[in-house]
Structures are given as C-alpha cells and as structure tokens.
Amino acid sequence: MRTFGILLLAALIAVGGYIVWHNRMLEKEAERLRAQLAAQESEITVFLVKHTPVDFVLTPVTRKISGPATPQKALELLIEGPRPGEDLHPAVSPRTQVESLTITEGTALVSFSKALQEDYIGGAQNEANLVTAIVHTLIQFPEIERVQILIAGEVVETIGGHMAIDRPLSGM
C-alpha cells in the first residue's frame, strides 16, 4: 500500500510538472501571436470633409494602422480628423469622445460625449456630413449593418435639427 502511495505521489508530481510546463508553452505561444498581430498592418476608411467653392463634400480617406482594424479604432481615427498637409476638415469635433461602443445583432450602439452636439457648427449639410461620416465609418465592418448614435448614453432626436438620429441608421 505504501509503494502505491509513493507511486501515486510521484505520478501527481509528474502531472503537475507537465501542466506547469504546458501552461508556460501556451503563454509563450500567446505572446508570439499577440506580437504577430500587433505587427500586422490594416487599413481603415474614415470620412472627412473637403471644402469646394460651392459645397462641403464628404470624402473617404484610408488610414493604415498597425494591428487589427476595429470599429473602436475607426472612431478614434474619425475623431482625430485630417493629418497635417491634407486639404480636409474634420467631420466630427476633435473634442468629441466615444463613451461606449457595443455591437449587438448587427447594430452598433455608440455613445458620444456631449461635445458631438455642443461643437456642431450648424447647417443641414454639416449635420448630414457628421452623421453620415459616423455611420459609414462603422458600417465598413461586416459585423455592423446599422448605427444608433447616442449623446451621453441617451437617444436624441437630432444633433442640430436637420436629421433624425433617434433610430438606427444604415448606409445613407
């Protein structure tokens, strides 16, 4: 009986050692995959505004990023706006913050800070560009079909009185 106990203890120690070793190997592999993913380059399209002599035109702009393209990263780039030297203007105020973003059954529910509404400069075209830039930036992702824009977590009828945003919007 004593020999059986010693053999059982030795087997448990061996199994425990194997589990620890295997766990370390899995951690190393996970770290390698994370590094590989971070080194990967992706593209995201954001929508910025180009001023013409008679209009404000929403213009798609492709941004290269390291790592995977995500809806959250796309919104960050949209809010970041144009880069130096680009003859473009932001569609969304750079003071705006994304408070939350959830995706459920094809609908992206995105809550922006009050700056989205407070910094709105007026006009139907500007409001249309603002809303369309947000929607188009998000629906490029296959998991998103519709976008519900919230202000400080609340559904609002409109940002500036020209365009209804009180329901989910799709490619307009």
Image: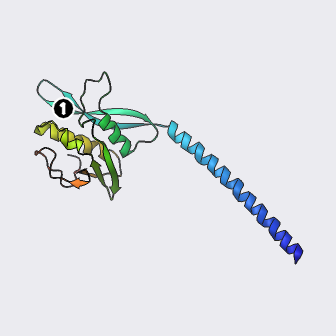
Q: Position of residue 7 (x, y in %)?
A: 84, 69
Classify 161 as above or below 79: below
Residue 131 in sight: no
Amino acid tagged 1: Val
Residue 167: x and y in percent read 19, 55
Task: Point out residue 112 in the picture as x, y percentages from the top left corner.
Answer: 27, 47
Which residue occupies the extreme bottom position in the image? Answer: 1
Nearer the observer, 12 or 135: 12
Residue positioned 29% across, 29% down in the render: 82
The residue indicated by pointer 1 is 57
Instruction: Between residue 107 and residue 152, name the one nearer to us.
Output: 152
**Quarter of the view holding residue 49:** top left
Side (left or right) of 33 relative to 75: right
Q: Which residue occupies the foreground of this view, 20 or 36? A: 20
The quarter of the displayed image where residue 96 is located: top left
Mark 1: few/some/many CA within 10 Å (<14, 14-19, 20+): some
From the image, which quarter does the N terminus lie in?
bottom right
Q: What residue appears at the point 29 percent right and 24 percent down from the top-left corner?
A: 86
Residue found at x 26% / y 43%: 134
Q: Secondary structure at mark 1?
A: strand
